[in-house]
Amino acid sequence: MVAPGCDSAPTLPKEPALNAMRAADYNPAQQEVVSLLGAPKGERPTFDASLRDELRFLLEERLEPLVAIIKSDRFDDDVLYLSKFRLVQALGCERKLLAELAAPFQWSIPTARGTVTHKAIELSAHWRGETSPLALVDEAMARLENADKSIADYLQSCEETERAELRAEVGTAMTHFLECFPPLKPKWRPTTDSPIRAELHAGLIVLSGKPDLTLGQPEGTVAGKVIIDFKTGRFSPVHREDLRFYALLEALRILPPRLLATYYLDQAKFHPEEVTRELLLSAAERVIDGAHRYVEIASRHREPTVAPGPACRWCPVQFGCDEGTAYLDEAPDEGIDW
């Protein structure tokens, strides 16, 4: 409608180029993402407001036996921190867990690849004007290199060939992302690598995570958030468990998300899962199991068990492990993921 006294309607400011695509401009892969993630409000699940208290009570009750051990001299840390990675460690090969606890973390191309990619995706969501995958990668690496984080030392000191290889691998991942994922519009409320945490037993046990991407928000007791993790390589059940852990953290924080999705960039393929009360209870049981196992091993309460699997490929004690060596001799190539 034209305002009185005006010759024409006012010109609205244009959206940034990366966010200006119309639905008709989406390629088939992008349209599939929009179709999957979109859901009318009437089709979104509702969760009881008391669920967060129910889940917290369950966790604190079942983790109570660990409090005395964490406070004792047998446990090296003052607080038990549980992330998705630590849960995978605890629920996997315990011999590998014990070896990794004794070895300091070191940055490398495989460990840095995900961090740089996630930073580049974050920049793409807010970038004004045209850009390219490698431009986003370069800016992401520059930002991280000047950040107050441990990866900064790695990026500043690594050899040029290693830096170039990292840049190439992240550039490929970003090319896949921009090709197959629709531009992130501000109205979707995108957040990347946003920390979420839950403190139990007065902060003695901390559950924490940083989802790659979240979209939407809850409205009252109606779930509206979608949590997405980006991967490359083959599907793994662990990827689904990671997202269930994030769903549990959101449920303890405010309200569960409505949907979880692992997105495999090199396949342009989603593995979605709807969030239910039963899923959250299952995720809580996994946290309880993982916490008990981790504390038992970290406090040297018992001897570690051995569970050969794909993780044997990067186990620090693989060459001295008969079970791991036998597995690797027979196992096919599982691909990579980050």
Image (cartoon, grey):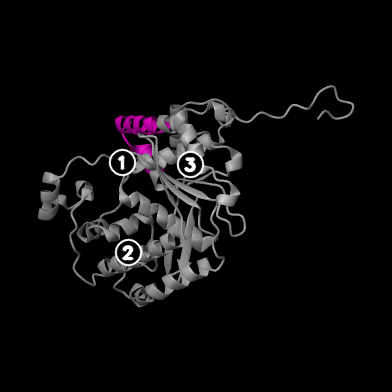
Which percent across, then down, holds residue 12?
Answer: 72, 29
User: Looking at the rendering, which quadrant does residue 157 occupy?
Assistant: top left
Q: Does 288 appear in magenta? A: no
Label 2 vs label 3, nearer the camera: 3
> What residue would you read off at disc 2?
290
Q: Camera-side residue: 255 or 294?
A: 255
Please provide percent x and percent y for residue 18. 55, 30
Residue type pointed to by label 1: Pro
Q: Residue 322 falls in which quadrant of the image? A: bottom left
Rounded to the nearest angstrom, the CA distance separating label 2 from label 3 is: 32 Å
Q: Residue 304 carries which label?
A: none
Residue 246 rendering spot, x and y as whole percentages: 44, 55
Residue at left offset 51%, top offset 29%: 26
Instruction: Tell me the chief SS of the magenta region.
Output: helix
Q: On the image, numbered disc 3 is attached to which residue? A: 36
The tag earlier along the polypeptide, 2 or 3, is 3
- What amino acid is found at the position of numbered circle 3 in the picture? Leu
